[in-house]
Image (cartoon, rainbow, N blue to C red):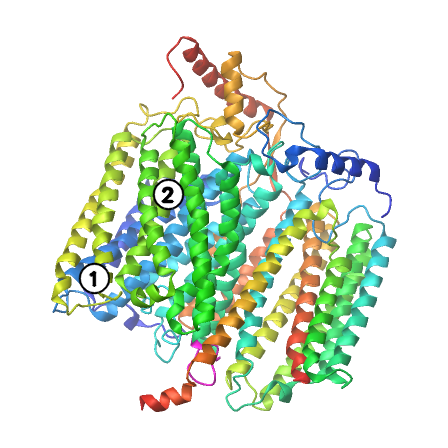
Amino acid sequence: MSELETDLHRHGGIGHEDHAPGDEPHESVGHWVRNYLLGLFFAVVLTICSFWAATSHMIWAPAVPVAIVVFAIAQMGVHLVFFLHITTGPDNTNNVLALAFGVLVVFLLVTGSVWIMYHLNHNMMPTDEMMQMQR
Amino acid sequence: MFGKLDWSAIPFNQPIPLITSVILILGILGVLGLITVKKWWGYLWREWITSVDHKRIGVMYMLLGVVMLIRGFADAIMMRTQQAVAIHSAGYLEPEHYNQIFSAHGTIMILFGAMPLVIGLMNFVAPLQLGVRDVAFPTFNSVGFWLTASGALLVNISLFVGEFSRVGWLPYAPLSETTYSPGVGVDYYLWAVQISGVGTLITGINMVTTVLKMRCPGMTYLRMPVFCWTTLASSLLIVAVFPILTATLAMLTLDRYFGFHFFTNDAGGSPMMFMNLIWAWGHPEVYILVLPAFGVFSEIFSTFSGKPLFGYRSMVAATLFICVVSMMVWLHHFFTMGAGAAVNTFFGISSSVIAVGTGVKIYNWIFTMYGGRVRFETPMLWSMGFIFTFIIGGLTGVLLAVPPADFLTHNSMFLVAHFHNVIVGGVVFAVFAAVEYWFPKAFGFRLHAGWGKAAFWFAFIGFWVTFTPLYILGLQGMTRRLQHIDVEAWRPMLQLSVVGVAILIVGVICQVIQLVVSILQRDKLRDETGDPWDGRSLEWATPSPAPFFNFAVMPNVEGEEAYWGIKQRAIDTQQLAPEPDYRPVEMPLNSPVGIYTAFFSTVTGFALIWHIWWLAGLGLFAAFIGFVVFAWRDVHEFEVPVEELIRVERGRRAARDAFLERIRQGEGAPS
Amino acid sequence: MSDLPFPIAREAVLRRRADPDLAGHDPHGPKEAVPGTGHGDSGPASKRIIVGYGFWIFLLSDIIVFSCFFAAYAVLQGSTAGGPTIKDIVDLPRTAIETGALLLSSFTCGLSYAATNARNKLWTQVFLGITAILGLIFVGLELQEFIELAGRGATPQRSAFLTGFYALVGCHGLHVSVGGLWLATMMAQVQLKGFRHEIIHRLICFNLFWHALDIVWVGVFSVVYLMGAAA
């Protein structure tokens, strides 16, 4: 293959390359399996926690959504770290930056939309009343 | 069998679209016939249609953009003349037709004119400036182009088969819902924009990856030319906001095709959510267009002033600032909708703040010229015209960003004048400047300077004569999109505006003449050295036209203004750098997958527009099969032999040696 | 960390940190480019990284598509137009099974990639196969849910809330289905072509895609189902 395709052992097997997200070409199978088992364990625990938070009445009702959101964010973090192998290492800087940019956009879009639409709805006459007036 | 499609879809009773389409069809048949007679098909297929070379794809994008620009300009001529004659009368365009024209004008100009032009520039220039041989995903690049072309084709098919959308360039709900727009017009819009949007997204991903992962050795982030920075920022915005467009149009599609209730009046749908989502895409979209334009001007000001760009770091910071803040201003497009004081205030302030980034840039450009040896070549004229035009456009923009003022000017001709002021003055001027500037790199000869300057002056004056009256009309209370006018007082300004359009037409004719004259005189205008403007970035290190592999040996960058350093060293030492080791280069093979995808996406889109379900299914299935077949290909690259590299490189070195010789003999400084 | 020749990587990193030119813009003449840190200052990255990174960027854009549907759902959630509310249509046991199936499939998908890295075709295929079956179970359960709801008259045409619900959950389901189609194609490719470079790159991408879908599902079951049940 091409000169670019020197995947694993570029520069004589030195592993200071950037990594593609989700990719750690130098790791052994044992490392992978251990990582995935850990990830699965944490994910299952967090999933159970959030289902529990939603169904049991142990938590003060208005706090339930907060608990669910916290568990969800934690679980997303677990997935990112253990399944997608996003780390803080220098080989991952670009991946993390891209992710941060994506999270920023998602945050702006969702909170912005909800905020704007909440205020629009709040200020607007209900549709059926308006229909009444037009009649 | 054919869904909603039957003979009534052909506009036999409307002379204007009918005659236009007959002329267009005859023209296309003529071109195809000429290609067949001259036996150019093989050449076209090998060198252009299946090419995955970023420069070829860039040129094809530009060609598409220019053709669509002319189509959109024709719409503009009809709108201006209609409004000038339709005072207390019906004019010559029926309301239904007039509505289609302003909708098509906006859609085509932004999505199929300006976007391909800007993307074409990024494609052509960025890899050359980064010192690499191609973009990250060459085949996907071709797919992206052909999807865009496919969308443009669908829009133009609507001229002849059926109708186009009548609801404006953004299909505002609930007007665009089936209740109020039962025809196929909105469907044409939806599928055309959706298909080309996917193409744009592919390009965005491609360019982000190219800039972040494919720079030549030594090209650290803060050594990249500003155009590469703006390419990165613009592509990041594409990746961030085109998905919003995709999702929003998908929701409208679900409403129209399956009776969902995202944006309907009834069953709890929220039409205002459409405005919200579409502008969350729509505002960053204008920065997607204008950021690369800023990059173009940065290159041109520095080259033609003979100085490094003033305040490079602040330029980069301003670019990234605009990139992020542009996603926090979208509500200013609907201040009047009633989100209340708190929300309006926030977005009013953020919309004003974003002008700071642009202001930084304007000062940097002015200071770049200050103390420089300014050469008033055509690209420089466009750039200086841009500064003047864009400042006025920017100032009226800040005015519109103030909610109380916006309440008075919302949807008025003032707004129309404002956004033409920034988009024409910013993007279109930049594209014309860039075409003059990089044309030699693409084709090996410069464009004729005299006709270019004439084109600039006619366009510049024509622009102001067209749009100044619209500002005044807007302040007098004229709203946009009027098919006929009942206010006698507006007549003089509307007619003055038509005079401006006439001047613009002369400008366009000058551009065409410039191209023809330049081709005829190409031997006289030939760029022998590959560096016609005394450039500063790496694209000028290649011969003109640039070979398909760009660089025989990847450059090693040792400072900012990569090529300027190399050039000065050569001039100082009176010799070129020693000849390096040449190694064979791997280049991607041509691929028909782009044209294949475009064919089936056009078919599928057309089938969906007309509810021909079996054909849509067939098209999707064929697309899947195509991808599998493509994925099965084993050989993706071919090797360019060393002999070929040496042949091209020796030619380049000979030209540079001759250039050094001329300097040695005291024939003056370069240029 | 395993057998990484760590000191060398560390040295490269330290040199980068010490290098004022890391910040780039150094007008005072040439600086040595640090070899192989792969941030572009040493030349283009390898194809593997380029492909992985490009797909990562695509995934971000895909996540943004989802975020639009999330936003739409959040806005329309209360607009039930007299129809069923979220509380009426949530069936938590099924959601729990769906969640388990998708989580396990994410796990097996990861294992398949570990097998790929060890160049073990058999285990790669076995784990990809299990992933496919779990994905099918997920899509099947979701279809069953939709059909049941439609049978009770809770169709997306009924109200804006149901529109948002079907679109968000359905968008995710559609992604899983398309992912399944891709998965089947990949299995055929691995079988017939073995671990060629391009195949491995595609497996990296597929792995990313599948994990990302699971992350989106965490959002879906939390925001739609659990908050709905708790509301």
The amino acid at mark 2 is Val
CA gap between label 2 and label 1 equals 30 Å
Q: Is residue A129 above or below residue B340?
A: below
The amino acid at mark 1 is Ile
Residue A39, horizontal then vertical, whole percent? 80, 63
Residue B207, horizontal then vertical, whole percent? 54, 46
* Near-viewer residue (B49 or B510): B510
* Near-viewer residue (B211 or B120): B211
Identified at 72% across, 34% down, the residue is C18
Picture quarter containing residue B175? bottom left
Marked residue nearer the N-terminal end (2 or 1):
1
Residue B153, horizontal then vertical, whole percent? 38, 57
Q: Which residues are magenta?
A: B259-271
Q: Residues within 10 Å of mark 2 (few under 14, many from 20)?
A: many
**In the rendered image, which quarter contains the N terminus of chain B?**
bottom left
Q: Which residue is mark 1?
A: B16
**In the rendered image, which quarter contains the C terminus of chain B?**
top left
Label 1 resides on the chain identified as B
Q: Is residue B91 above or below residue B546?
A: below
Q: Which mark is residue B431?
A: 2
Left/right placement of residue B656 relative to residue B398 reads right
